[in-house]
Structures are given as C-alpha cells and as structure tokens.
Image (cartoon, helix red, strand yellow):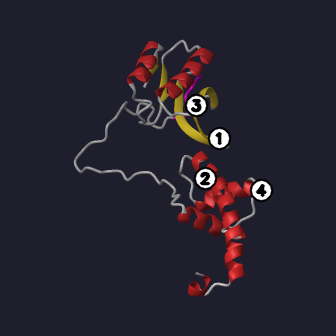
C-alpha cells in the first residue's frame, strides 16, 4: 500500500501512532471552548465575539482561526428574522401614547416608564425589566430572570407598587412588546390603579 501511494514506511507507522497533527489536536481543543461560548451566547455570537470571549478566558488564537473552526463545524450566528410588512395594515396599539413625550412630571409617582434589557453573563443571558419614576429618575422596581415573559414585567411593576405605595393613579409608559400587552399584565395594572 505504501508503494502504491508513494508514502515512506516510517511516515505510515508514524501516522498509525498519531493520526492527527498537533494543529488538528489544538483545533479540537479550541472547538470545545468555541462550542461552550457559542451555546452560552444562545447561538447568537459570530467569530469576532467568540474570539473576544476566548481572549477574556486567556486563550491566545487569532480571530481567523476561530472563524475557520466555526465554519468547518457549521457554527453560524443566528441573526434573527426578517419582518414581513403588509401594505395597508395599521399597526396594533396596546395602549395610546398618553405620556406624549412629557418626561418632566411635577411630582413623584405621577409617571413611570418601563422597559426590558438583557445582560450577558458567563452562564448565558439574563433579562432585566425596570420601572423608572420620571420625577426622580430613580429605578423604583426591577426584576431579573432567564426568560423574557409577562411574569418578568409584572414582578418589576409589583416591586414598584409595593415600594412606592402610590395614592393616586400612576401613568405607566412602556413599549408595545407582547409582555406589556398580556392579559395578566393589563389586569395587574387595573387592580393596582395604574394607567397604561
């Protein structure tokens, strides 16, 4: 077989003892780390971000090597989805824009704003919902969880209600996300004298 493929006997026996090169062995070790960071990002990171995470972990390799390993193992960043636009349809409104960009209320507990953001950790993403009083510009309620659902925003609003104990109706302004339009969230707001 060595004569047919024109390979020296010593090379064949060396290959039998060690079928993978040093570079291939190092690539396999790096692949395990890349997969860990890729899964921790929720499959949203591409090679530049994975490379940055590996540098923070103390690994010394180039971004091109990370890109090559990811490409060879079919690890691609999940970029999201394309929105479909249908002509002639009006956008759905959960609530009217009552605040109308009036971000300077006269007293506390008159207008609150709420939003959700995410924080990257070594174990994945955490979602944080906050409620901010526009008068004092202080966070009056917050909630953190691994999932972004209606319970996340309800807990943040519950913390704000318990902490502030508003006597009058409070205007709560938020985006038009599905968490803020859920039946449970709207029922909680009605029960606690909060206006959407």
Q: Which mark is residue 58?
A: 4
In space, the residues marked 2 and 3 are separated at their CA atoms by 24 Å
Q: Quadrant of residue 177?
A: top left
Secondary structure under tag 3 reads strand
In space, the residues marked 3 and 1 are separated at their CA atoms by 13 Å
Label 3: how many Cα within 10 Å (few below 14, some 14–19, many 20+): some
Q: Position of residue 23 (x, y in %)?
A: 69, 69
Secondary structure under tag 2 reads helix
Label 1: how many Cα within 10 Å (few below 14, some 14–19, many 20+): few
Q: Position of residue 71 (x, y in %)?
A: 54, 65
In space, the residues marked 2 and 4 are separated at their CA atoms by 16 Å
Is 45 within the magenta? no
Q: Of the two numbered discs 2 and 3 on the same chain, state the one appearing first in sequence.
A: 2
Magenta span: chief secondary structure = loop
Give 133 or 49, whichever is nearer the viewer.
Answer: 49
Q: Which mark is residue 35?
A: 2
27 left or right of 98? right
In space, the residues marked 1 and 2 are separated at their CA atoms by 13 Å
Q: Give the number of the mark in front: 3 or 1.
A: 1
- Residue named by callout 1: 123
């Amino acid at each position: 077989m060595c004569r047919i493929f024109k390979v020296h006997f010593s090379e064949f026996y060396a290959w039998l003892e060690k079928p993978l090169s040093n570079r291939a062995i190092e690539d396999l070790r790096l692949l395990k780390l890349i997969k860990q960071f890729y899964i921790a990002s929720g499959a949203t990171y591409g090679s530049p971000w994975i490379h940055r995470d590996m540098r923070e972990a103390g690994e010394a390799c180039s971004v091109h090597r990370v890109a090559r390993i990811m490409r060879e193992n079919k690890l691609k960043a999940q970029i999201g989805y394309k929105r479909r636009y249908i002509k002639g349809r009006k956008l759905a409104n959960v609530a009217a824009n009552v605040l109308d960009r009036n971000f300077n209320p006269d007293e506390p507990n008159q207008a609150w704003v709420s939003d959700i953001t995410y924080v990257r950790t070594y174990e994945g993403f955490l979602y944080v919902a906050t409620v901010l009083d526009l008068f004092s510009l202080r966070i009056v309620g917050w909630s953190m969880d691994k999932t972004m659902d209606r319970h996340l925003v309800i807990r943040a609003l519950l913390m704000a209600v318990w902490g502030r104990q508003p006597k009058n109706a409070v205007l709560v302004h938020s985006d038009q996300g599905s968490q803020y339009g859920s039946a449970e969230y709207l029922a909680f707001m009605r029960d606690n004298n909060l206006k959407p």
